[in-house]
Amino acid sequence: MTDDSAGEDAGTAEGGSPPARRDVPDDATVVYDLDDDCTIDDVAEGARYLVTVNGVVDYGVFVDVSDNVSGLVHESGLDGEYEVGDELVVGLTEIRENGDLAFEEVDPDENRVVRVEHEPEITAIDDLTRDETVTVEGELTQIKQTGGPTIFHVGDETGIVAAAAFEEAGVRAYPEAELGDVARVTGEVGLHDGVRQLEVEDVTVLDGEKAEAARERLDEARTERAGPEAVEPLVEWPEFEKLRGDLEDLARLLRRTVLEGRPIRVRHHADGDGMCAAIPVQRALEHFIQEVHADPDAGRHLLKRLPSKAPFYEMEDVTRDLNFALEGRARHGQQLPFLLMLDNGSTEEDTPAYRNLAHYDMPIAVVDHHHPDPEAVDPLLDAHVNPYLYDEDYSITTGMMCVELARMIDPEITDELRHVPAVAGVSDRSRADAMSDYVDLAEAEGYDRDDLDDVGEALDYAAHFLRYSSGHSVVNDVLNVGCDDRDRHEELVEFLSSRAERDVDDQLDAVEDHVEHETLESDAHLYRIDLDQWAHRFTYPAPGKTTGELHDTKVEETGDPVITIGYGPDFAVLRSDGVRLDIPEMVEELNEELPGAGVSGGGHLVVGSIKFVKGRREQVIDALVEKMADAEIDEALSSTAAALDD
């Protein structure tokens, strides 16, 4: 008898019959050697097996086919005498109704042994039933060592479930299993804190063809499930349709990220448009995470939203994010997160932070409407959605784009979001043709134009005092997304917006008498204010908002092209109406013309902020004014007046 077990995993054929190897000659008989964990489902009448004697009685011998399968060789079917531990080859003559197996000894000559691995019935995670012992097959998306058991998170085509394996307190169970492996996890389905969880009996890491086949199956299923939902746009807007394909691709990427169990970290500009972008996407992703994970609280652990004060990714922010991500990997066994940048992230100023992340496995995507530097940022990004890439501009706000993105992730939240694009547009002073349609949509939800102004003002006010906190509950109530009390929303907006209006009025009263005015050669009005000397500091409104509010009053007073500069010791905030500026280009030129001044910044073409070395302020401001004086007048060009907080 020859042994073909080396390197051969025969598996179990369809219908329960072990398959014969294709290279077994027709005149040879296959003998199956079953793995210890094989069950009665892995045997079939008429097949031959290599067995071990486990007992000898007067009427025959009892034999083990595996740890789980035993039977009797009756004395009438025995050709020799055997003792416990002896091996022999038998044929399975009958599987009785009560489950007993009957064998007879067969001639071992000319037989070839084929090893059979147990192929358990695989249960989909979505179909787990309490108190049943099951086997699931999927990718290990998280491995967390606690003071007690090791917690494996396993993801298949239908969902992700936690599985607790106990070796001894604080000791890593199944150390051969690593993050990203494909494994079979067997255990009993129970509840832990009210959440389904497997109590592990065994973890088997797949390799070779089995692992490859499982990964291929998972990839195909995830690709199909990650597809964005087909939704009709909230308003008809041809210019916006240019972006729809990019938004669909990003929705697919984000849904795939959730299916893979990877955390997501959202960074957004801390202003009205930034929050109108981030809150809908956060809401949609939380819903999808709950759909995928057995744990309804998974969204709290896998999704973090944080504001950024600057309209670009500062090194301070990326250092915090990276440290948080690495701690999450070390303490909780998580994958490094997917970084989603909203209402910032498109400019060359973002690239140092992105290069810092390039040392790690952290995908990055951007949705933004600031004037981009695609040659600088795109090689560092996995996705980039920006209207400027399609010859459109900032009038398509990030909030408008992200409402559609959120609906592609989870269309069920549409009714919560119908008023949000109008709030985003009002907050960023969008002059888009579609603004009237968005306002009409909001009015149908009970928001008139004054209400929209108040919500935008309340968002800015809340963002100012929240600083580096997401303010999840408060911001959701202000925006009325995920808020379960419309009366509370209205009362909160009234309170915050009235406080904001009062503080803005106080600030304008403080600076009004100190505003410097001159008329440029182009006949544009230039207003300057030293915010460090004359504005209230460390309170609302911040320098960007103060400059924007002052600018709006001057535009209304004059009806002419207006440029406003609000400056401090090492910064300047710029606003323009009716003057064709290109602030990012001016920053680049100032850097070349004033070496050592440390000029940096940017933003929109006609709305932005810059920083510089304190001792070079006078030179920088004077050079900036010269460039503004040379800019062409364009009555059709209007400022977004977005509040860029320094």
Image (cartoon, rainbow, N blue to C red):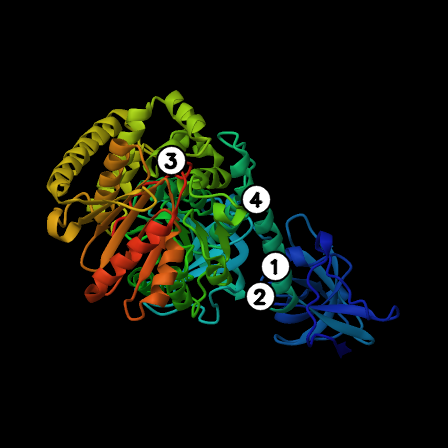
Q: In the rendered view, would you say 555 is above or below 254?
A: above
- The answer for how far apart the CA atoms under marks 1 and 2 are is 9 Å
The percent coordinates of residue 68 (x first, y second) are 58, 61
- The front one of 173 and 333 is 333
Q: Which residue is mark 4?
A: 245
Give the side of residue 484 with respect to residue 11, left or right.
left
Q: Which residue is mark 3?
A: 425
Side (left or right) of 14 relative to 483: right
- Residue type, mark 1 in image: Ala
* Labelled pair 1, 3 in contact (Cβ < 8 Å): no
Q: Secondary structure at mark 2?
A: loop
Kind of residue indicated by mark 2: Leu
Q: Earlier in the sequence, mark 1 or mark 2?
A: 2
What element does badge 1 sit on? helix
Q: Going from the N terminus, do you reach mark 2 or mark 4 first?
A: 2
Residue behind mark 2: 206
The answer to whether the residues at label 3 and label 4 have Cβ atoms under 8 Å apart is: no
Tell which circle, 1 or 3, labels the residue nearer the N-terminal end: 1
Q: Residue at x 31, y 67 (%)?
A: 594
Rendered location of residue 254, percent (x, y): 48, 49
Residue with the most extreme front position? 521
Q: Residues within 10 Å of mark 4 (few under 14, many from 20)?
A: few
Classify mark 3: helix, strand or loop.
helix
Gap in Å between the C-alphas at discs 1 and 3?
A: 47 Å
Give the image quarter of residue 560: top left
- Residue 214: mark in rendering: 1
Give SS at disc 4.
helix
Q: Nearer the viewer, residue 637 or 323?
A: 637
Residue type at mark 4 is: Gly
Cα–Cα span, label 3 and label 4: 22 Å
Asked if disc 1 and disc 2 are in contact, CB closer than 8 Å, the reply is yes
Nearest to the eye among marks 2 and 4: give it. Answer: 4
